[in-house]
Amino acid sequence: MKKVVVLTGAGISAESGIKTFRDSGGLWEEVDINEVATPEGWKKNPARVLEFYNQRRKQVLNAKPNTAHLALVALEKAFDVHVITQNIDNLHERAGSKKVLHLHGEVTKSRSTADPGLVYDISGWKLDIGDICTKGSQLRPHIVWFGEQVPQMELASEITSRADLFIVVGTSLNVHPAAGLVHYASDKSRKFLVDPNPVGVDQVKNLEIINEKAGVGLPALVRKLLSEI
Protein backbone atom coordinates (compact mmCIF):
# COMPACT_ATOMS: atom_id res chain seq x y z
CA MET A 1 0.00 0.00 0.00
CA LYS A 2 1.44 3.35 -1.03
CA LYS A 3 2.24 5.88 1.67
CA VAL A 4 0.61 9.31 1.48
CA VAL A 5 1.81 12.08 3.77
CA VAL A 6 -0.36 15.19 4.05
CA LEU A 7 0.85 18.46 5.55
CA THR A 8 -2.11 20.59 6.59
CA GLY A 9 -2.33 24.17 7.78
CA ALA A 10 -4.88 26.74 8.89
CA GLY A 11 -6.59 26.89 5.51
CA ILE A 12 -8.11 23.44 5.90
CA SER A 13 -9.78 24.42 9.18
CA ALA A 14 -10.79 27.92 8.09
CA GLU A 15 -13.66 26.39 6.11
CA SER A 16 -14.95 24.95 9.38
CA GLY A 17 -15.13 28.47 10.81
CA ILE A 18 -11.88 28.42 12.77
CA LYS A 19 -10.08 31.73 12.49
CA THR A 20 -6.57 31.74 11.12
CA PHE A 21 -3.78 33.81 12.62
CA ARG A 22 -2.29 35.49 9.58
CA ASP A 23 -5.18 36.26 7.26
CA SER A 24 -7.02 39.57 7.22
CA GLY A 25 -9.33 39.55 10.20
CA GLY A 26 -7.29 36.77 11.78
CA LEU A 27 -6.35 36.33 15.40
CA TRP A 28 -3.10 38.26 15.27
CA GLU A 29 -5.04 41.43 14.45
CA GLU A 30 -6.85 41.10 17.75
CA VAL A 31 -4.01 40.20 20.12
CA ASP A 32 -0.30 40.71 20.62
CA ILE A 33 1.38 37.35 20.01
CA ASN A 34 3.99 38.17 22.62
CA GLU A 35 1.24 38.37 25.24
CA VAL A 36 -0.46 35.03 24.53
CA ALA A 37 1.85 32.77 22.51
CA THR A 38 5.30 32.99 24.09
CA PRO A 39 6.87 31.64 27.29
CA GLU A 40 7.42 35.27 28.34
CA GLY A 41 3.72 36.06 27.93
CA TRP A 42 2.88 33.05 30.08
CA LYS A 43 5.21 34.18 32.85
CA LYS A 44 3.83 37.72 32.73
CA ASN A 45 0.12 36.90 32.75
CA PRO A 46 -0.83 33.20 32.75
CA ALA A 47 -4.50 34.00 33.36
CA ARG A 48 -4.69 35.98 30.12
CA VAL A 49 -2.99 33.18 28.19
CA LEU A 50 -5.38 30.60 29.62
CA GLU A 51 -8.39 32.72 28.70
CA PHE A 52 -7.11 33.22 25.14
CA TYR A 53 -6.83 29.47 24.62
CA ASN A 54 -10.10 28.83 26.42
CA GLN A 55 -11.78 30.88 23.70
CA ARG A 56 -9.87 29.04 20.98
CA ARG A 57 -10.87 25.74 22.55
CA LYS A 58 -14.52 26.71 22.68
CA GLN A 59 -14.35 27.65 19.00
CA VAL A 60 -12.80 24.30 18.10
CA LEU A 61 -15.37 22.30 20.06
CA ASN A 62 -18.19 24.10 18.25
CA ALA A 63 -16.64 23.54 14.82
CA LYS A 64 -17.19 20.50 12.60
CA PRO A 65 -14.92 18.72 10.12
CA ASN A 66 -15.47 19.85 6.54
CA THR A 67 -15.24 18.15 3.14
CA ALA A 68 -11.44 18.48 3.07
CA HIS A 69 -11.03 16.64 6.38
CA LEU A 70 -13.44 13.95 5.23
CA ALA A 71 -11.64 13.56 1.89
CA LEU A 72 -8.46 12.53 3.71
CA VAL A 73 -10.41 9.87 5.56
CA ALA A 74 -11.72 8.54 2.23
CA LEU A 75 -8.13 8.36 0.99
CA GLU A 76 -7.38 5.82 3.74
CA LYS A 77 -9.48 3.25 1.86
CA ALA A 78 -6.64 2.71 -0.59
CA PHE A 79 -3.55 4.38 0.88
CA ASP A 80 -1.54 4.43 4.08
CA VAL A 81 -2.28 8.05 5.03
CA HIS A 82 -0.36 9.98 7.66
CA VAL A 83 -1.52 13.54 8.40
CA ILE A 84 1.05 16.01 9.73
CA THR A 85 -0.78 19.13 10.84
CA GLN A 86 0.29 22.58 11.93
CA ASN A 87 -3.20 23.05 13.38
CA ILE A 88 -3.96 22.78 17.07
CA ASP A 89 -7.58 21.68 16.56
CA ASN A 90 -8.79 18.08 16.55
CA LEU A 91 -10.88 18.16 13.38
CA HIS A 92 -8.76 15.54 11.60
CA GLU A 93 -9.34 13.09 14.44
CA ARG A 94 -13.04 13.89 14.64
CA ALA A 95 -13.36 13.35 10.90
CA GLY A 96 -11.88 9.88 11.34
CA SER A 97 -8.22 10.15 10.30
CA LYS A 98 -6.29 7.42 12.12
CA LYS A 99 -2.71 8.74 11.95
CA VAL A 100 -2.36 12.40 12.91
CA LEU A 101 0.82 14.11 14.10
CA HIS A 102 0.42 17.59 15.63
CA LEU A 103 3.50 19.75 15.12
CA HIS A 104 2.31 22.73 17.15
CA GLY A 105 0.43 20.95 19.91
CA GLU A 106 -3.24 20.38 20.67
CA VAL A 107 -5.60 22.96 22.14
CA THR A 108 -7.80 20.24 23.65
CA LYS A 109 -4.95 19.09 25.88
CA SER A 110 -2.95 20.55 28.76
CA ARG A 111 0.46 19.75 30.10
CA SER A 112 2.39 20.17 33.31
CA THR A 113 4.65 23.19 33.75
CA ALA A 114 6.90 21.01 35.89
CA ASP A 115 7.09 17.94 33.65
CA PRO A 116 6.38 18.38 29.90
CA GLY A 117 5.82 14.62 29.66
CA LEU A 118 2.60 14.91 31.67
CA VAL A 119 -0.14 15.65 29.14
CA TYR A 120 -3.86 15.51 29.87
CA ASP A 121 -7.10 15.74 27.92
CA ILE A 122 -9.12 18.79 28.91
CA SER A 123 -12.72 18.10 29.87
CA GLY A 124 -14.85 20.79 28.29
CA TRP A 125 -13.34 24.08 27.15
CA LYS A 126 -11.91 25.67 30.29
CA LEU A 127 -8.43 25.49 31.77
CA ASP A 128 -8.00 27.79 34.76
CA ILE A 129 -5.48 29.03 37.27
CA GLY A 130 -5.40 26.40 39.99
CA ASP A 131 -5.76 23.44 37.63
CA ILE A 132 -2.73 21.34 38.48
CA CYS A 133 -0.93 18.20 37.35
CA THR A 134 -0.31 15.12 39.49
CA LYS A 135 2.92 16.73 40.69
CA GLY A 136 1.07 19.80 41.94
CA SER A 137 2.17 22.26 39.25
CA GLN A 138 -0.04 24.56 37.21
CA LEU A 139 -1.23 23.19 33.88
CA ARG A 140 -0.61 25.15 30.68
CA PRO A 141 -2.01 24.72 27.16
CA HIS A 142 -0.34 21.87 25.28
CA ILE A 143 0.82 24.29 22.58
CA VAL A 144 4.20 24.98 21.00
CA TRP A 145 4.68 28.71 21.52
CA PHE A 146 6.93 31.05 19.57
CA GLY A 147 10.48 30.60 20.77
CA GLU A 148 9.94 26.97 21.79
CA GLN A 149 11.30 23.88 20.06
CA VAL A 150 9.00 21.82 17.84
CA PRO A 151 9.52 18.40 19.43
CA GLN A 152 7.78 16.41 16.68
CA MET A 153 9.79 17.81 13.77
CA GLU A 154 12.29 14.95 13.66
CA LEU A 155 9.51 12.37 13.52
CA ALA A 156 7.63 14.43 10.91
CA SER A 157 10.76 14.63 8.75
CA GLU A 158 11.28 10.88 8.96
CA ILE A 159 7.65 10.17 8.03
CA THR A 160 7.84 12.59 5.09
CA SER A 161 11.04 11.01 3.76
CA ARG A 162 9.15 7.74 3.22
CA ALA A 163 6.21 9.26 1.33
CA ASP A 164 5.24 7.98 -2.11
CA LEU A 165 2.88 10.95 -2.40
CA PHE A 166 3.19 14.21 -0.48
CA ILE A 167 0.24 16.60 -0.30
CA VAL A 168 0.33 20.14 1.09
CA VAL A 169 -3.02 21.77 1.80
CA GLY A 170 -4.12 24.92 3.56
CA THR A 171 -0.68 26.29 4.39
CA SER A 172 1.33 29.09 2.87
CA LEU A 173 4.60 27.25 3.55
CA ASN A 174 5.73 30.32 5.46
CA VAL A 175 5.61 28.74 8.93
CA HIS A 176 8.97 27.28 9.83
CA PRO A 177 10.26 24.74 10.51
CA ALA A 178 7.13 22.95 9.19
CA ALA A 179 7.46 24.59 5.75
CA GLY A 180 10.75 22.79 5.25
CA LEU A 181 9.11 19.37 5.32
CA VAL A 182 8.45 19.51 1.58
CA HIS A 183 12.21 19.25 1.06
CA TYR A 184 12.35 15.98 3.00
CA ALA A 185 10.09 14.30 0.46
CA SER A 186 11.97 12.28 -2.14
CA ASP A 187 12.53 13.86 -5.55
CA LYS A 188 10.81 10.75 -6.95
CA SER A 189 7.62 11.16 -4.90
CA ARG A 190 4.58 12.79 -6.45
CA LYS A 191 3.72 16.09 -4.80
CA PHE A 192 0.56 18.15 -4.78
CA LEU A 193 -0.11 21.63 -3.41
CA VAL A 194 -3.73 22.67 -2.80
CA ASP A 195 -4.04 26.40 -2.15
CA PRO A 196 -6.01 29.25 -3.74
CA ASN A 197 -3.13 31.69 -3.31
CA PRO A 198 0.32 31.85 -4.91
CA VAL A 199 2.86 29.96 -2.81
CA GLY A 200 6.62 29.98 -3.10
CA VAL A 201 7.65 26.43 -4.01
CA ASP A 202 10.69 26.91 -6.20
CA GLN A 203 12.94 23.91 -6.81
CA VAL A 204 10.34 21.35 -5.71
CA LYS A 205 10.34 18.46 -8.18
CA ASN A 206 7.27 16.52 -9.37
CA LEU A 207 4.90 19.16 -7.99
CA GLU A 208 1.36 19.72 -9.24
CA ILE A 209 -0.36 22.88 -8.02
CA ILE A 210 -4.14 22.95 -7.53
CA ASN A 211 -5.34 26.55 -7.15
CA GLU A 212 -8.47 25.83 -5.13
CA LYS A 213 -9.63 26.11 -1.56
CA ALA A 214 -9.08 23.00 0.52
CA GLY A 215 -12.77 22.07 0.54
CA VAL A 216 -12.86 22.01 -3.27
CA GLY A 217 -9.37 21.06 -4.38
CA LEU A 218 -8.65 18.29 -1.89
CA PRO A 219 -11.80 16.21 -2.53
CA ALA A 220 -11.13 16.52 -6.28
CA LEU A 221 -7.54 15.37 -5.80
CA VAL A 222 -8.62 12.42 -3.67
CA ARG A 223 -11.14 11.34 -6.30
CA LYS A 224 -8.38 11.52 -8.90
CA LEU A 225 -5.96 9.45 -6.84
CA LEU A 226 -8.57 6.81 -6.04
CA SER A 227 -9.54 6.57 -9.72
CA GLU A 228 -5.95 5.82 -10.70
CA ILE A 229 -5.82 2.60 -8.67
Image: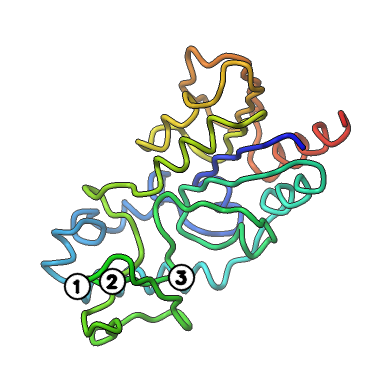
103 relative to 90, above or below: above
Q: Earlier in the sequence, mark 3 or mark 2?
A: 3
Residue 128 lies, in percent from the top left, at 29, 83
Mark number, residue 46:
1
Query: What amino acid type should be assigned to the residue bearing mark 1?
Result: Pro
Q: What element carries label 1?
A: helix
Q: Is residue 13 left or right of residue 80?
A: left
Q: Marks 2 and 1, how far apart in space?
A: 8 Å
130 relative to 107, above or below: below
Q: How is the image coloured?
A: rainbow
- Position of the N terminus by quadrant: top right
Mark number, residue 111:
none
Q: Are marks 2 and 1 in contact (CB under 8 Å)?
A: yes
Q: In this view, does 39 lie to the left or right of 50?
A: left
164 relative to 64, above or below: above
Residue 33 lies, in percent from the top left, at 24, 54
Identify residue for label 3. Answer: 108
Crowding at mark 3 (Cα within 10 Å: few <14, some 14-19, many 20+): many
Q: Marks 1 and 3, how far apart in space?
A: 17 Å
Query: What amino acid type should be assigned to the residue bearing mark 3?
Result: Thr
Question: Residue at left 40%, top 42%?
Answer: 153
Identify residue for label 2. Answer: 140
Question: Residue at left 36%, top 65%?
Answer: 142
Query: What amino acid type should be assigned to the residue bearing mark 2?
Result: Arg
Q: Earlier in the sequence, mark 2 or mark 1?
A: 1
Residue 74 lies, in percent from the top left, at 78, 49
Q: Is residue 158 left or right of residue 211?
A: left
Q: Is mark 2 on a helix, strand or loop?
A: strand
Q: Is mark 3 on a helix, strand or loop?
A: strand
